[in-house]
Amino acid sequence: MYTAIILAAGKGARTTLSVNKTNLLLDHKPLYKHSVDVFKSAGVNVVLVINKDDEEFIKKWSNNTLYTYGGETRTDSVNEGLKLVKSKYVFIHDAARPFINKKMIEDIKELLNKYDAVLTCKNVVNTIYDKELNVIDRNTLLEAETPQAFSTEKIKKAYEEKGVKNYTDDISVFKDYFNDEIGLYFHDYNNIKITTKKDVEKYLMPNYKIGHSFDIHQTDKNRKLILGGVEIKSDFGLLGYSDADVVLHVVAESIYGALGIGDLGTHFPDTDNKYKDLNSQKLVIFALEKLKEKGYVLENMDITVFLEKPKLSMYINKIRKNIAELLNVNESNINVKSSTYEKLDAIGSGKAIAAEAVCLIKRSN
Ligand code: CTP
Ligand code: MG
């Protein structure tokens, strides 16, 4: 009795990403599939409208879902979807609104008993101006959302007659042909349409991610010992292409890990001359830039240094403070501890110093 046309044939141009936004993963599932699954769970048949280019991806995730190719505009895509609908009623829904739920669908079904067209909508809460800066009385306005639902026979007729123009929703096509009263479905759910890059960052990226790094350097009598950006009194230092600050290496690299952007070598290859004797603070500054670019902040970091000597206890606070300053967080979010290797292995015999860091990053919007 019910079919849902789920529109996923756009380009998602406003996200400025190179992929169609409806294929992006939300909670480990493509955006479009959230709507498919909700409609199916409410006993509604689904016709998915897709881009030809996305076909392999869609088949992988939804091989038992009926689909067809969309067109150049949303209106063209609806036209294509409607060709496959045979049920009495049809829902038309943007796959870019993944947060719909079963209750909304059941409520709209109820309204279809009374109306041949139903608009999901919200009252406008902001003050709205036109571009000449006249205030428009918001009580006269409604914000349209999807799903919108119809008598199939009528919406097919309206699209047949009017669907050559370009519309941004389906109620407007219906209204251009029929004078029927439209059922209004108000709700309090978050039914946002993922449209911009900001929306993608806010709704699709995980709230928290963890990162980890381990690094080890050989000791060397001819070098200074720098740990966490602090010079340590010692009769040896660490060998390495950069300044060999093993602590700052794991600080930076654990953040790269949390962001999923590879390791130190990816960004600062030791085959590149310009990184010789590099001050490792630069690796941390780069990590901070990447955090910001990807929309995250550091929540906390726990660092362990493994060395037999020298004793680090009198430097720990200084290292901690230095790392907190570099990372632009409160000291309470950074923990630094040291441990010996009980005289075992390369570290225990003083041939190497190692460090390990674990961090948690949090979405910043
Ligand atoms: N849509 C479609 N076919 C089109 C254009 C849009 O099926 N030719 C779908 C989109 O996939 C989306 C919904 O219509 O689920 C709402 O459109 P919109 O948010 O504008 O998505 P896009 O057109 O993909 O995005 P943009 O306008 O930024 O390119
Ligand atoms: Mg569009």
Image (cartoon, grey):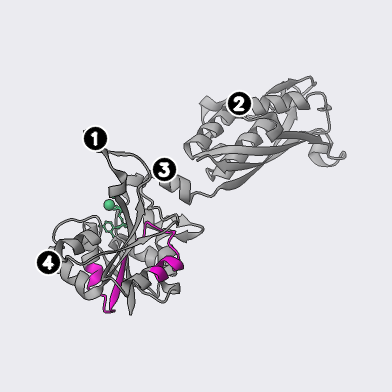
Check disc 2 and report the residue beneath it. 281
Q: Residue at x 57, y 30 (%)?
A: 283
Q: Answer few, some or many: residues within 10 Å of disc 2's Cα (few below 14, many 20 plus, some between 14 and 19).
A: many
Residue 91 colored in magenta in the image: yes
Quarter of the image for residue 158 reads: bottom left
Marks 2 and 3, how far apart at CA: 30 Å
Marks 4 and 2, how far apart at CA: 66 Å
- Left or right of 309: which side holds 302? left
Earlier sequence position, callout 4 versus callout 1: 1
Marks 4 and 1, how far apart at CA: 35 Å
Earlier sequence position, callout 3 versus callout 1: 1
Amino acid found under the numbered disc labelled 1: Asn
Q: Is residue 3 above or below residue 125?
A: below
Give residue 161's mark. 4
The reply to whether the residue tagged 4 has its Cβ within 8 angstroms of ligand 1 is: no
- Left or right of 7: which side holds 197? right
